[in-house]
Image (cartoon, grey):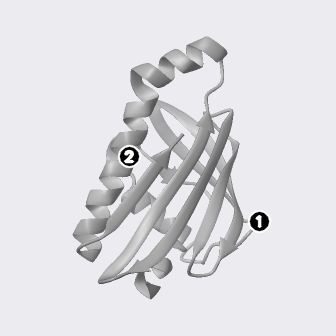
Amino acid sequence: MDQAWEYFSTPSNLQEITPKDLKFKILTDIGKEKMYAGQIINYIVTPLFGIPMRWTTEITHVEEGKYFVDEQRFGPYSFWHHKHFFTPIEGGVLATDVVDYALPLGILGRLAHAIFVKAQLKHIFMFREKKLEDMFGSFEKDSANR
Protein backbone atom coordinates (compact mmCIF):
# COMPACT_ATOMS: atom_id res chain seq x y z
CA MET A 1 0.00 0.00 0.00
CA ASP A 2 2.78 2.42 0.92
CA GLN A 3 4.55 1.78 -2.39
CA ALA A 4 1.36 2.40 -4.41
CA TRP A 5 0.57 5.60 -2.53
CA GLU A 6 4.16 6.82 -2.85
CA TYR A 7 4.01 6.32 -6.62
CA PHE A 8 0.57 7.84 -7.23
CA SER A 9 1.03 10.80 -4.89
CA THR A 10 3.98 12.01 -6.96
CA PRO A 11 2.38 13.91 -9.88
CA SER A 12 5.51 13.70 -12.05
CA ASN A 13 4.89 9.93 -12.38
CA LEU A 14 1.76 10.60 -14.44
CA GLN A 15 3.85 11.08 -17.57
CA GLU A 16 5.28 7.57 -17.14
CA ILE A 17 1.84 5.91 -17.11
CA THR A 18 0.35 7.87 -20.03
CA PRO A 19 0.48 6.40 -23.55
CA LYS A 20 3.29 7.87 -25.66
CA ASP A 21 0.93 8.60 -28.57
CA LEU A 22 -0.68 11.39 -26.48
CA LYS A 23 2.65 13.25 -26.30
CA PHE A 24 1.79 14.12 -22.71
CA LYS A 25 4.16 16.54 -21.05
CA ILE A 26 4.01 18.15 -17.63
CA LEU A 27 4.81 21.86 -17.91
CA THR A 28 4.72 22.74 -14.21
CA ASP A 29 8.08 22.36 -12.48
CA ILE A 30 7.03 19.94 -9.75
CA GLY A 31 10.11 17.74 -9.50
CA LYS A 32 9.38 14.79 -7.22
CA GLU A 33 7.25 16.75 -4.74
CA LYS A 34 4.15 15.10 -3.30
CA MET A 35 0.70 16.27 -4.30
CA TYR A 36 -1.32 18.49 -2.01
CA ALA A 37 -4.81 19.97 -2.06
CA GLY A 38 -4.75 23.18 -4.06
CA GLN A 39 -1.84 22.12 -6.28
CA ILE A 40 -2.18 23.36 -9.88
CA ILE A 41 -0.48 21.34 -12.62
CA ASN A 42 -0.21 22.37 -16.28
CA TYR A 43 0.23 19.86 -19.10
CA ILE A 44 0.35 19.61 -22.86
CA VAL A 45 -1.53 16.69 -24.35
CA THR A 46 -2.06 15.79 -28.02
CA PRO A 47 -5.29 13.80 -28.09
CA LEU A 48 -6.44 14.40 -31.65
CA PHE A 49 -4.91 14.94 -35.11
CA GLY A 50 -1.52 15.87 -33.63
CA ILE A 51 -2.93 19.13 -32.24
CA PRO A 52 -1.38 19.95 -28.85
CA MET A 53 -3.74 21.20 -26.16
CA ARG A 54 -3.03 22.76 -22.78
CA TRP A 55 -4.65 21.07 -19.81
CA THR A 56 -4.67 22.51 -16.30
CA THR A 57 -5.77 20.45 -13.32
CA GLU A 58 -6.08 21.13 -9.63
CA ILE A 59 -5.60 18.52 -6.93
CA THR A 60 -8.67 19.35 -4.85
CA HIS A 61 -8.67 16.65 -2.18
CA VAL A 62 -6.00 14.40 -0.70
CA GLU A 63 -6.43 11.90 2.10
CA GLU A 64 -3.00 10.37 2.69
CA GLY A 65 -2.90 6.71 1.68
CA LYS A 66 -6.59 6.56 0.74
CA TYR A 67 -7.65 8.81 -2.12
CA PHE A 68 -7.13 12.00 -4.08
CA VAL A 69 -9.17 14.01 -6.57
CA ASP A 70 -8.05 16.00 -9.59
CA GLU A 71 -10.31 18.41 -11.44
CA GLN A 72 -9.75 20.12 -14.77
CA ARG A 73 -9.58 23.91 -14.56
CA PHE A 74 -8.82 24.51 -18.26
CA GLY A 75 -8.65 21.99 -21.07
CA PRO A 76 -10.50 19.86 -23.60
CA TYR A 77 -13.47 18.92 -21.39
CA SER A 78 -16.26 21.17 -20.20
CA PHE A 79 -16.16 19.12 -16.96
CA TRP A 80 -13.56 16.68 -15.58
CA HIS A 81 -13.63 15.25 -12.04
CA HIS A 82 -11.31 12.27 -11.42
CA LYS A 83 -11.30 10.40 -8.11
CA HIS A 84 -8.52 7.90 -7.32
CA PHE A 85 -9.15 5.42 -4.49
CA PHE A 86 -6.62 2.97 -3.02
CA THR A 87 -7.75 -0.03 -1.00
CA PRO A 88 -5.46 -2.63 0.52
CA ILE A 89 -6.39 -6.16 -0.55
CA GLU A 90 -4.75 -9.50 0.06
CA GLY A 91 -1.42 -9.47 -1.77
CA GLY A 92 -1.62 -5.87 -2.98
CA VAL A 93 -3.72 -2.81 -3.66
CA LEU A 94 -6.96 -2.20 -5.51
CA ALA A 95 -6.81 1.13 -7.36
CA THR A 96 -10.20 2.48 -8.40
CA ASP A 97 -10.66 5.41 -10.77
CA VAL A 98 -13.99 7.19 -11.00
CA VAL A 99 -14.10 9.74 -13.79
CA ASP A 100 -17.04 12.04 -14.34
CA TYR A 101 -16.69 14.20 -17.42
CA ALA A 102 -18.56 16.10 -20.09
CA LEU A 103 -17.51 17.35 -23.48
CA PRO A 104 -18.28 20.80 -24.86
CA LEU A 105 -20.18 21.56 -28.08
CA GLY A 106 -23.47 19.79 -27.35
CA ILE A 107 -24.37 17.27 -30.04
CA LEU A 108 -20.93 17.59 -31.66
CA GLY A 109 -19.33 16.71 -28.32
CA ARG A 110 -21.63 13.71 -27.93
CA LEU A 111 -20.75 12.59 -31.46
CA ALA A 112 -17.01 13.00 -30.73
CA HIS A 113 -17.50 10.96 -27.57
CA ALA A 114 -19.14 8.13 -29.48
CA ILE A 115 -16.56 8.19 -32.30
CA PHE A 116 -13.27 8.48 -30.41
CA VAL A 117 -13.23 10.04 -26.90
CA LYS A 118 -14.71 7.04 -25.09
CA ALA A 119 -12.31 4.67 -26.89
CA GLN A 120 -9.36 6.94 -26.17
CA LEU A 121 -10.15 7.07 -22.45
CA LYS A 122 -10.45 3.29 -22.41
CA HIS A 123 -7.06 3.08 -24.17
CA ILE A 124 -5.46 5.36 -21.56
CA PHE A 125 -6.77 3.39 -18.59
CA MET A 126 -5.91 0.01 -20.15
CA PHE A 127 -2.38 1.30 -20.87
CA ARG A 128 -2.05 2.39 -17.25
CA GLU A 129 -3.25 -0.95 -15.95
CA LYS A 130 -0.71 -2.83 -18.08
CA LYS A 131 2.11 -0.41 -17.20
CA LEU A 132 1.35 -0.71 -13.48
CA GLU A 133 1.27 -4.51 -13.69
CA ASP A 134 4.66 -4.42 -15.44
CA MET A 135 6.06 -2.11 -12.77
CA PHE A 136 4.53 -3.56 -9.60
CA GLY A 137 3.53 -7.11 -10.54
CA SER A 138 -0.06 -8.07 -9.88
CA PHE A 139 -1.97 -4.82 -9.66
CA GLU A 140 -5.73 -4.61 -9.67
CA LYS A 141 -7.35 -1.60 -11.25
CA ASP A 142 -11.01 -0.81 -11.33
CA SER A 143 -12.17 1.98 -13.62
CA ALA A 144 -15.60 3.55 -13.63
CA ASN A 145 -16.19 6.10 -16.39
CA ARG A 146 -19.40 8.06 -16.53
**Residue 102 x, y percent position in the rendering:** 62, 32
- The amino acid pointed to by label 1 is Gly
Task: Judge by depth and name the residue closer to the eye, 6 or 51.
Answer: 6
Q: Can residue 50 be seen in this view?
A: no
Residue 15, above or below 108: below
Q: Seen in the image, is 89 located left or right of residue 62?
A: left
The residue pinned by badge 1 equals 38
* Position of the C terminus by quadrant: top right
Task: Judge by depth and name the residue closer to the eye, 57 or 31.
Answer: 57
Residue drawn 32% across the image and 58% down it: 129
Outermost top residue: 107
**Residue 135 x, y percent position in the rendering:** 27, 72
First in residue order: circle 2 vs circle 1:
1
Q: Seen in the image, is 5 located left or right of residue 83?
A: left
Outermost right residue: 38
The residue pinned by badge 2 equals 124
Cα separation between marks 2 and 1: 25 Å
Outermost bottom residue: 2
Task: Judge by depth and name the residue closer to the eye, 3 or 16.
Answer: 3
Element marked by disc 1: loop
- The amino acid pointed to by label 2 is Ile
**Residue 109 x, y percent position in the rendering:** 58, 20
**Residue 121 x, y percent position in the rendering:** 43, 40
